[in-house]
Image (cartoon, helix red, strand yellow):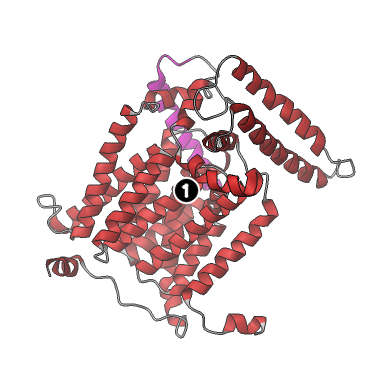
């Protein structure tokens, strides 16, 4: 079969989903190293500790990986520097300086007896506690780094997480009865927008995006009357989020419960907000509300860092300075200043704001019930950013969950344009059932 025939012959949707995923994975070979951040060292050393490595072994493997990444970036930067590109590669010098710097801090802390927990002491003990409360991502990494080693294990796990995020965007749109081309557009958008770039970094954000999309898929299934699938997806995703980053489970539980309340009030009024909701939607609301309450209780029982500790972490530059005596007033001042500056920068290059508005318009206009859930999911990114108003954090990764709104909403906005052109490729299913029809189906 010729290459032309491969792409002109009618193919099932899963062929195109896998093809897009494969193309994306191949493109990521251009940057196998150099994606790590300071947080990566904590997650990687945690994973190596879970695998059974000693503190020294975990530190050695983590430092080697981090320093190799720095050297790779330094070599690439130097190769295109208009003044220094003729000079020898600085990679060896960068590795030596990096190892000396990292081992200096780690050796000092290990000698001082800072050996508790799973994380190698790259950071102060109070800061380490924040990462100790996030076992989900390190546990996910263990099989990959065990089989493939640190370098390729981290790369492969990041590719699989990001590919899964794109596939979940496709599944959400197909569940909403969007044409295949529209759903594939959502998959592509997840890969090419900043959410895909952030998901590829070896941090928790990739899993947070994938699990949030899985919960939204459950909400889409709820609108189809799929009670069991809804409960499994929403409940399972929220439970997994607690292990990965419990604050996201808290935010998503709160926002999904709020979305169900909005739908209930819209259908039944303030007096009877739940009676007009179909059973699957009530299940979403109950599971989400219970997750919010259980997360608050479990975090306290497990001794996770409190909101006041997180506040001190923010205001003292990760506990490198004395604690603030009046953290809340300072935090509120910083919050206002942050959003003023954030809005100023976004209006300078308003791509993100435009994408959010267009995504919200597409979702709320074309699928109004699901649009409420989608906006709720995106709102968790805003809440996460509001809890950490640090303008210097790289790549807007704290607000990255807001990108789920354009990933799913923009294809829905373009759906009307795509529909007339998809004949022969896709049969457009019937529209979503109404709540009254769902209630009738449940009654039967």
Query: Is most of the magenta stretch helix, strand or loop?
Result: helix
In the rendered image, the quadrant that contains the C terminus is bottom left
Magenta segment boundaries in residue numbering: 323-348
- Picture coordinates of residue 123 (x, y %)? 57, 25
- Picture coordinates of residue 200 (x, y %)? 57, 50
Looking at this view, is 248 or 295 the one in front?
Answer: 295
Look at 42% across and 44% down and name the residue there: 381
Residue 320: image quadrant is top right
Work out which residue is located at the far left of the displayed protein and give it.
271
Q: Is residue 392 visible?
A: no
Taking the magenta stretch, the answer to whether it contains residue 341 is: yes
Please indicate whether residue 258 sits to the left or right of residue 139 in the image: left
Q: How many marks?
A: 1
Look at 48% across and 22% down and name the residue there: 126
Q: Secondary structure at mark 1?
A: helix
Circle 1 packing at 10 Å, graded few (<14), some (14-19), many (20+), is many
In the rendered image, the quadrant that contains the N terminus is bottom right
Q: Is residue 105 visible?
A: yes
Q: Which residue is mark 1?
A: 207
Residue 53 versus residue 354 in the image, above or below: above
Taking the magenta stretch, the answer to whether it contains residue 132 is: no
Please indicate whether residue 65 sits to the left or right of residue 76 in the image: left
Please indicate whether residue 297 sits to the left or right of residue 391 in the image: left
Residue 128 versus residue 347 in the image, above or below: above
Look at 28% across and 70% down and name the residue there: 432
Looking at this view, is 399 or 358 the one in front?
Answer: 399
């Amino acid at each position: 079969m010729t290459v032309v025939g491969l792409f002109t012959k009618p193919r099932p949707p899963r062929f195109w989903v896998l093809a897009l995923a494969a193309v994306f994975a191949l493109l990521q070979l251009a940057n196998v190293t150099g994606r790590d951040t300071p947080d990566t060292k904590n997650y990687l050393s945690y994973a190596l500790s879970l695998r059974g490595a000693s503190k020294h072994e975990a530190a050695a493997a983590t430092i080697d990986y981090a320093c190799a990444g720095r050297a790779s970036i330094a070599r690439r930067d130097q190769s295109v520097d208009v003044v220094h590109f003729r000079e020898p590669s600085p990679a060896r010098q960068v590795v030596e300086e990096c190892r000396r710097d990292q081992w200096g801090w780690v050796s000092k802390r290990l000698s001082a007896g800072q050996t508790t927990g799973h994380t190698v002491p790259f950071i102060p003990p109070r800061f380490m506690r924040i990462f100790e409360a996030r076992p989900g991502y390190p546990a996910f990494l263990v099989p990959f780094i065990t089989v493939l080693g640190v370098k390729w294990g981290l790369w492969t796990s990041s590719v699989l997480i990001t590919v899964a995020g794109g596939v979940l965007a496709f599944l959400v749109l197909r569940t909403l009865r969007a044409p295949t081309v529209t759903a594939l557009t959502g998959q592509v958008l997840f890969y090419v927008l900043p959410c895909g770039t952030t998901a590829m970094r070896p941090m928790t954000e990739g899993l947070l995006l994938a699990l949030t999309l899985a919960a939204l898929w459950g909400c889409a299934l709820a609108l189809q009357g799929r009670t069991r699938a809804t409960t499994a997806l929403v409940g399972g995703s929220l439970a997994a989020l607690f292990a990965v980053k419990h604050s996201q489970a808290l935010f998503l539980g709160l926002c999904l419960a709020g979305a169900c309340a909005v739908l209930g009030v819209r259908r039944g009024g303030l007096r009877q907000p739940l009676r007009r909701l179909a059973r699957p939607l009530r299940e979403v609301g109950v599971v989400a509300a219970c997750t919010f309450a259980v997360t608050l209780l479990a975090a306290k029982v497990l001794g996770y860092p409190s909101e006041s500790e997180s506040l001190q972490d923010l205001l003292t530059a990760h506990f490198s300075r004395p604690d603030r005596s009046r953290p809340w007033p300072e935090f509120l001042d910083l919050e206002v200043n942050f959003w003023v500056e954030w809005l100023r920068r976004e209006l300078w290059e308003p791509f993100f704001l435009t994408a959010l508005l267009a995504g919200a318009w597409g979702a709320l206009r074309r699928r109004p019930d699901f649009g409420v859930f989608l906006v709720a999911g995106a709102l968790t990114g805003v809440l996460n950013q509001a809890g950490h108003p640090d303008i210097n954090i790289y790549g807007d990764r704290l607000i990255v969950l807001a990108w789920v709104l354009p990933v799913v909403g923009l294809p829905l906005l373009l759906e009307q344009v795509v529909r007339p052109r998809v004949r022969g490729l896709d049969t457009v299913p019937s529209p979503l059932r109404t709540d009254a029809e769902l209630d009738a189906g449940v009654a039967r």
